[in-house]
Image (tube, coloured by chain):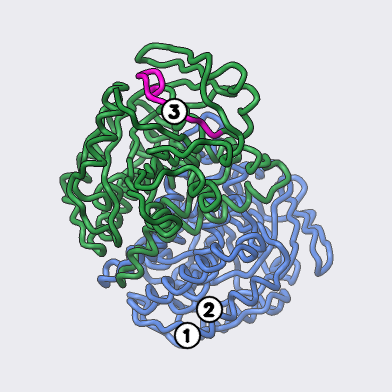
Chain colours: A blue, B green
């Protein structure tokens, strides 16, 4: 049994799911919560899952990071729209030589984390997970769950597979979470953006599911063009995404069940959209390399407009009350 | 008094307004109608206007083009989404050496008309008109009304100002419709697209009025980028739109009252959108010259998706029942 202790920052659909699975596998896990703290500190976590339902009647729950013990691995499972909180949240809870494991979408978060805190390893994980939080401390896991893992080095210099990566993979594998180790985190992140940029963006702007976007010849073409622009962005940072990967993503999405993307769910529930992590940061990386991505830029500007409108409208939930 | 006779194909907010004004000024005008035929043939046309309300209790109304007399000037005032009807509508109603006056948005319609019928002059008019049809034969004129006029020659070769243009301007001026004559119709059409492409497109896609688009820094920037792409398109066909014109359009729109674009009104009322005339044709013209307009293309593909969705949904009105 691993002696490594875990802190989960953001006990929602993603952090709650992975943290609960780790605790169920016997690891020591500490959960930071906000609105769900009263419920979870009393009654623990419930996970309804296609892999088997389970309940953790008792968990280490916290509403204040200052009360948490320092942990070996700190899992950043917030939405990226909450990342302005990281300078307060991370330093008190991470052990020296610990690992910050960033389980978020988009690009550039590892860089931010590395600037906040030194003397730790920063590892990025790309989660392929369909899960929802259906109530306080109540998570419904619908499908998938595997994670692609890569370690961050300054300027996203490829690290190969490292011991820290292998240790974390061991822990997650013991919890039946498959982990794939990649030698180049940045390439992994760009590859995930090949899917996330067209489908997250267009699903929000056009109020559409993935199958609707693929059934129309015009949006199907636009999806493909956006994917090629992501590949241009990757190339501007020295990473090559082959055409065959793009074709595979298109075929894969056509075969998927109709899917409402995570950004569409955020939009429908009037939560802030992860526009900067998924669109803004990749655009800026490409731009810094002198490469313009006009169609991604068009979608980005449209999303910024929609994001501002849902957040500044009177109907918007008080999002900072929520993790 | 002019001896020229006019046929109005499409007696809606635009055709009904201009036709009524011409008849009121003493010209002989013949109106083609579809759904409004019973009402208008009985009770004529009503125009409520900031320039003064008036009623024409009796007008020459037709539901069938074959019953119309041949006219000197045939005004095409259909929505461009109905232009597939032109090969049936135009030939029976135009006199030899007559004029087809195309009062439509977008690009390329004059070319189509010239292919349908030879031995006539084709003149394009760009209408700056705010009017609505509020009931059968009942038109509300809100603002503006002036028209920019240019004659078509093959491949949009500039014609200078011609006698036919001057004659039509005389007739419209007698009806208090100001007409500006331009020497280069294609340049005029591109200039109008500088406004129509960003505002019509984004107002539909983002469900926004012009003032909302200009108040947000991201969409304001996107509007400007789209305008510069229109200028790139114009340049690909040899027409130069100066930067100062773009800045004037931006300033002008900021100062305008909040405005719901014509395409947004069509969308809200579930009518087919004029996507091909306003977006598709300019894109194809630029592409034929080897110039790619990626952001206009992005907006075009999004609009095609939305247009198909409103037209193929069960709620869509039977648009072909309407003029």
**CB under 8 Å between callouts 1 and 2?**
yes
Residue at 58% over, 37% down: B67
Residue at 55% over, 18% down: B44
Visible residue check, residue A75: no
Image quadrant containing the N terminus of chain A? bottom right
Image spot of residue B188 (x, y percent):
26, 47
Name the residue beneath numbered marker 3: B29
Residue at 55% over, 83% down: A181
Determine if the magenta segment contains residue B24: yes
Tell which tag, 1 or 3, sits nearer the viewer.
3
Name the residue beneath numbered marker 1: A242
Q: Which residues are magenta?
A: B21-32
Q: CA distance from mark 3 to mark 2?
A: 58 Å
Image spot of residue B54 (x, y percent):
44, 12
Q: CA distance from mark 1 to mark 3?
A: 63 Å
Kindly indicate whether the residues beneath marks 3 and 2 are on one polypeptide chain.
no
- Read off the chain for label 2: A
Q: CA distance from mark 1 to mark 2?
A: 7 Å
Name the residue beneath numbered marker 2: A246
Q: Quadrant of residue B26?
A: top left
Image spot of residue B62 (x, y percent):
58, 32
- Read off the chain for label 1: A
Q: Is residue A151 left or right of residue A143?
A: left
């Amino acid at each position: 049994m691993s002696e490594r202790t875990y802190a989960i920052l953001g006990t929602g659909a993603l952090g709650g799911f992975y943290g609960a699975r780790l605790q169920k596998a016997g690891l020591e896990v500490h959960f930071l919560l906000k609105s769900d703290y009263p419920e979870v500190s009393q009654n623990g976590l419930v996970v309804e899952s296609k892999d088997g339902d389970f309940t953790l009647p008792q968990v280490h729950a916290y509403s204040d990071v200052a009360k948490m013990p320092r942990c070996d691995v700190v899992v950043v499972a917030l939405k990226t729209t909450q990342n302005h909180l990281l300078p307060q949240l991370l330093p008190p809870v991470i052990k020296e030589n610990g690992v910050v494991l960033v389980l978020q979408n988009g690009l550039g978060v590892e860089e931010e984390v590395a600037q906040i805190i030194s003397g730790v390893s920063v590892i990025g994980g790309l989660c392929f997970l369909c899960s929802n939080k259906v109530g306080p401390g109540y998570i419904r896991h619908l499908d998938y769950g595997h994670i692609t893992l890569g370690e961050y080095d300054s300027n996203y210099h490829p690290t190969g597979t490292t011991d820290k990566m292998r240790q974390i993979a061991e822990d997650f594998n013991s919890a039946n979470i498959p982990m794939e180790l990649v030698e180049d985190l940045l390439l992994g992140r760009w590859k995930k953006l090949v899917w996330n940029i067209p489908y997250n963006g267009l699903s929000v702007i056009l109020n559409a599911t993935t199958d609707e976007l693929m059934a129309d010849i015009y949006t199907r073409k636009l999806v493909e063009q956006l994917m090629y622009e992501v590949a241009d962005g990757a190339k501007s940072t020295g990473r090559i995404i082959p055409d065959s990967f793009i074709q595979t993503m298109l075929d894969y999405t056509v075969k998927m069940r109709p899917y409402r993307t995570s950004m569409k769910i955020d939009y429908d529930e009037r939560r802030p959209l992860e526009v900067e992590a998924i669109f803004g940061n990749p655009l800026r990386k490409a731009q810094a390399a002198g490469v313009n991505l006009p169609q991604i830029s068009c979608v980005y500007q449209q999303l910024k407009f929609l994001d501002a409108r849902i957040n500044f409208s009177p109907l918007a939930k008080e999002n900072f009350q929520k993790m």
